[in-house]
Amino acid sequence: MPKEIIKQTKLEIAKQPEGLEGPGFFATKIDGVIGMARANSLWPLPFATSCCGIEFMATMGSHYDLARFGMERLSFSPRQADLLMVMGTIAKKMGPILRQVYEQMAEPRWVLSVGACASSGGIFDTYSVLQGIDRIIPVDVYVPGCPPRPEQIIEGILKIQELAKNESGRRRNNPEYKKLLNSYGIE
Amino acid sequence: MEDLLNKISLKLNAKFSNAIISSELLYDFPVFTINSANIHDVIRFLKEDDELNFHFLTDLTGAQTADEKQLSVIYHLHNMPKNWRVRVKTYFDINTPEIPTATDLWPGANWMERETYDFYGVRFIGHPNLKRILNVDEMDIFPLRKEYPLEDQTREDKDDKMFGR
């Protein structure tokens, strides 16, 4: 890139967490450091079932380039993934499979529900379609749209990153979180 | 097509008296409505007769009549060498939705009959594995019957005022 363009572009590296700084040392909370590391190296598991999945492919491609946010690598194994991205209509028959994928993910894990169908059933107000994935698994961020544009999906991801940065490093031991999981019947 | 309709009508009338309820040409397509007691014999005859030779089952599906009192099963048969096609329908009471299976004639009828059972609750007598195929196993309705609503009934945020239910 020519120097002029670099000057005009707002390039920022990830901000360091608050802490005490002095010559040769920097002291901070471990939660802040871990949160920063987690937020900037999320491994998403794409669970794409329909048109929102196509928008996700555009988001992942070179034009919108999700890799800018530390998501260079998609994880197609739930055991290695941090972020479950559900994109598209989830039929009732798909429900138990989605739930099993969520249960196989290790903590910390976040869920992004992309599009009207995943969030609420969307236009498919019918006997065969799950009326929102939050009926079977807890959701962290909802992205509206039918389908949402890649910019909206990126916005949703940035919200997930905010969550990852700011929450306690021991989220899974938090009684509130345990209660939430128990309300879905997940141990 | 007129010739084909007459040919099949003659053969069926000669072989099965009273089995044919109606025979007509709809959009240049021969359609037969058959008494449900004779349906299996009739489609067997259509398949095994040397001249007619409707050896291929294109489709098998169900339907419900507008008065909601009857179900029907519709067979689409095809004779590939001569490129003859025929549609065979049979109607029966919705309270006793039983009809002989066609899996003994065409193994391909297996999944089509499971689908028809899944959506209309037609019980195909003699089917080797009659269970739901597309919907969740726990479903306790036959969703394409008119007595069951189309919409998912567990939703509370949609009402008549907003969504025209």
Image (cartoon, coloured by chain):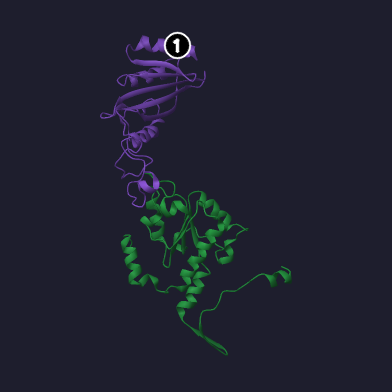
Q: Secondary structure at mark 1?
A: helix
Q: Left or right: B82 with respect to B44?
A: right
Q: Is residue B94 above or below residue B45?
A: below
Query: Disc 1 residue type?
Result: Lys
Task: Locate the C terminus of chain B by quadrant.
Answer: top left
Q: Is residue B107 visible?
A: no
State the hue of chain B.
Answer: purple
Q: Is residue B1 above or below residue A131?
A: above
Between residue A9 and residue A101, name the one nearer to us. A9
Q: Residue furthest front?
A: B161
Between residue B109 and residue A144, name the one nearer to us. A144
Residue at position x 36%, y 11% from top?
B15
Q: Is residue A180 above or below residue B40?
A: below
Between residue A120 and residue B23, name the one nearer to us. A120
- The x and y percentages for residue A172 are 37, 70
Q: Which residue is mark 1?
A: B7
- The x and y percentages for residue A19 are 50, 84
